Amino acid sequence: MLSPSQIFQPSVFWLTAFGLGFLRPAPGTWGSLGGLVFWWFFLAQLSVLTQLLIIVGYFLLSWWLCSRLINRLGLQDEPQIVADEVAGVWLALIFAPQVWWVALLAFGLFRYFDIAKPGVVGWLDTNVHSGLGVMADDMMAGLISAGIIWLVLQV
């Protein structure tokens, strides 16, 4: 388990979303909320392509850092690691306009799929391990949420 005393290690700082992963209860929700706030102020006005490039870069760096940290410390998918929630909620928001109810809907959908882990989200959580396993189920939860948001916005 990661402890707050490790926050000054750059990989822990990054993977806990600047310490949000140490907040209780529900560190995943805190990480997702931090991702939502960051998206609102810094990503929402960017094109879908630019957001996608940022998400992919963030995902790849987080996957690499997570794999290294897990291997070095002998960890699993620790609740303090919330970079996966940040990447997932950004993906959930990729088609969302900067409108409060759409952003909250995307956030809520993402949290539902991340917590309930239905279908392929649960399969990824159970069957994919290491740093990729930490990240993959949240990315799928974000992708499904983004698809629903896209459909809602088409009506």
Image (cartoon, rainbow, N blue to C red):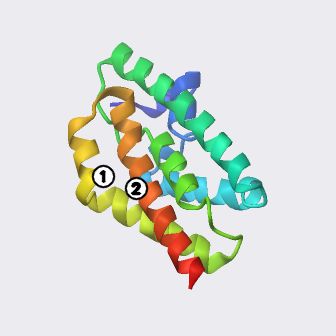
Q: Secondary structure at mark 2?
A: helix
Residue 121: image tag: 1
Residue at figure coordinates x 51%, y 28% from the top left: 12
Query: Is residue 89 positioned above or below 22 on the image?
Result: below
Residue 127 spot, x, y in % from top left? 21, 37
Q: Quadrant of residue 55?
A: top right
Q: Quadrant of the N terminus?
A: top left
Q: Amino acid at mark 2?
A: Ala
Q: Is residue 24 visible?
A: no
Q: Amino acid at mark 1?
A: Val
Q: Quadrant of the C terminus?
A: bottom right
Q: Quadrant of residue 48?
A: bottom right
Q: Secondary structure at mark 1?
A: helix
Q: Mark 2 = which residue? A: 141
- The answer to whether 17 appears left or right of 48 in the picture is left
Specify which label sits upstream in the sequence, 1 or 2. 1
Q: Is residue 105 visible?
A: yes
Residue at figure coordinates x 30%, y 52% from the top left: 121
Query: Is residue 78 positioned above or below 143 on the image?
Result: above
Marks 1 and 2, Cα distance to the nearest angstrom?
A: 6 Å
